[in-house]
Amino acid sequence: MKHIRNFCIIAHIDHGKSTLADRLIQACGGVTQREFRDQMLDSMDIERERGITIKSNTVSLNYRSPEGEDYLLNLIDTPGHVDFSHEVRRSLMACEGALIVVDASQGVEAQTVANLYLAMEYDLELLPVINKIDLPAADVDRVREEIDEDLGLDPFAAVPVSAKTGEGIEDVLAGVVEKLPPPEGDPQAPLKALVFDAHFDKYRGVILQCRVMQGTLKTKDAIHFMHSGRDYTVDELGYNQFKLVPQEQLSVGEVGYIVAGVKSVRDIEIGDTITRVEEPASEPIPGYQEAKQVVFSSVYPMSTDQYPDLTKALDKLAINDAALTYEKDSSAALGFGFRCGFLGLLHLDVVQERLQREFDLGLVISAPSVKYKLALKDGTAIEVDNPSYWPDPMSIESATEPFIKAAILTPEEYVGPVMELCREHRSESQTMNYLSAGRLEVISEMPLGEVLFDFYGKLKMITRGYGSFDYDPIEYRKTDVVKVDILVNKEPVDTLAYLVHRDKARTRALHYCERLAQEIPRHQFKIPIQGVIGGNVIARSTIAPFRKDVTEKLYGGDVTRKKKLLEKQKKGKAKMKQFGRVNIPQKAFVSVLRADKD
């Protein structure tokens, strides 16, 4: 156990975690030069294209120190985006130490601080790494000051590296061996192993990534999952070294894979504790938390005959992505679909893109919403995330919505616009912490629903890309939420209904009406498009009708002839309006929601 090191890499998004992992893998000879490709631990195409890590991944590396001693390094690469912080949490539970990577040009950012607190929660040893020292804008001395003042870590222990060129990588490996502690535990104690990740293999079922906390696990052992309560038999176990390397056993402190005939990721829970059936542990490993869905949206196929394909696609995605939840939903305008729960807007975006790419589906996504808690006048309490299930406003006693504690790190010159942006998004309290010269942190409590649409984009725009944002859910607070219906030719379109705070209802309704008026083609009759709350119209646009000039053939005579023809046309239009149907093209739904997201 003295020669094992379990560590992960944590950082703000785009600070070079995956590139650093690549260099560590190459330095340890984890892959041959012929097999190497950039972002080795990012397995999805979408991760490579966007340059982000969505799913944490692990690899076991053999490292020989300059003194000639052999070590087994278990490296876990984690996501940097706030939506996937549950992945980071599980990875931290499996480690004794972490490399906290800071960009040499951008310095300490919001997610860096958030990940530091997470690591401290699990009592991890931290080794700071200053990455991207090869950039012209790199300022290592300033970043050392920020590491001291913002993170409270030893600035002189920080290892300056360039993950791009490979400079300083040997120092990082030496730091991992010297500064990070080896695992502890009793190999003879009852088995406790933490499931920190899983992926689906179509030939072998679910392959679990586990860290043995105490005891020893062998092949053919009967195992029990303590949270889900299921029993399985271990068919194979071993190390993950880009290919699965079978072993006879996994002992305390080791990280590896387990194949046990699990058919779906839904059958087990990530973060669960494995123990032996014959000699069970008395209690599970503490710190287990379920992933909480905070954003809800309906997904419909572009054409109704693709519904069976969408059903199969979501089933397959959910096998790999345990955080995605979905249930059947239907709409009068768009037919059958699914109501899905996501961890955040990036998670929604990733799932949407994977459905379109991997399964070749055209999709319409409804406006994202959060979960509201309602107390009704008859004494019952309900939770609503779908506008279709919003009860009669007369029956609602009170409503509450989820609030978050947002931490925004920004250069000092942008603090005014940032605070104004928070106020626009119904911020309830704001405090400022001066972190270092020219940088400060704005802490604001605001509704989660206000952050869903354009907050992050606006923040990046007003701070010229230097602002960073992180949040934690805190509690539910009272609010004045209303359901806004969109009527097209006096008929409600249920897919376009949305839940919003009363102060923002008119602005959003105007946006919907104007976009629909641009996208819906003209008909033979006038089409009113209205945003309504109950019986009150709060916004309106009108699509003018096609109109034939019925008086064109007249060449003179009495004015009553002209009036007679116009009156006849007017009656025809009124009849048409009464019986005519408005065809809303699919692109109208897409344009409304896309514009809202932008």
Image (spheres, rainbow, N blue to C red):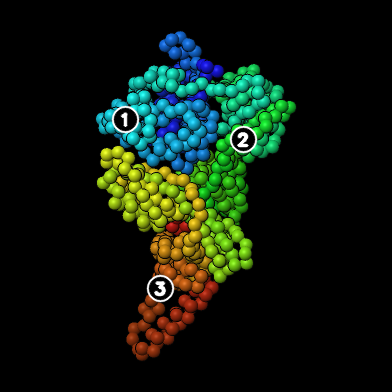
Quarter placement of the N terminus? top right
The location of residue 560, given as percent across then percent down, is 39, 89
- Inspect this view and state whether residue 476 appears: yes
The location of residue 333, given as percent across then percent down, is 54, 60
Q: What residue appears at the point 49 percent right and 31 percent down from the top-left corner?
A: 123
Classify residue 441 by image quadrant: top left
Whether residue 140 is situated above or below residue 295 in the rendered picture:
above
Question: Label 3, label 1: how many angstroms apart (C-alpha)?
Answer: 72 Å
Foreground pick, 281 / 78: 281
The location of residue 208, given as percent across then percent down, is 60, 30
Q: Amino acid at mark 3?
A: Arg
- Residue 421 vs residue 176: left or right? left
Question: Label 2, label 1: how many angstroms apart (C-alpha)?
Answer: 38 Å
Find numbered disc 2 in the image and state the secondary structure of the residue it sits on. Answer: loop
The location of residue 264, given as percent across then percent down, is 64, 37
Q: Amino acid at mark 1?
A: Arg
Q: Nearer the viewer, mark 2 or mark 1?
A: 1
Per the rendering, the mark at residue 272 is 2
Looking at marks 2 and 3 on the same chain, the residue that comes earlier in the sequence is marked by: 2
Per the rendering, the mark at residue 144 is 1
Q: What residue appears at the point 39 percent right and 18 percent down from the top-left corner?
A: 170
Number of other residues with Cα within 10 Å of mark 1, as a class: few under 14, some 14 to 19, many 20 or more:
many
Residue position marked by numbered label 3 in the rendering? 547
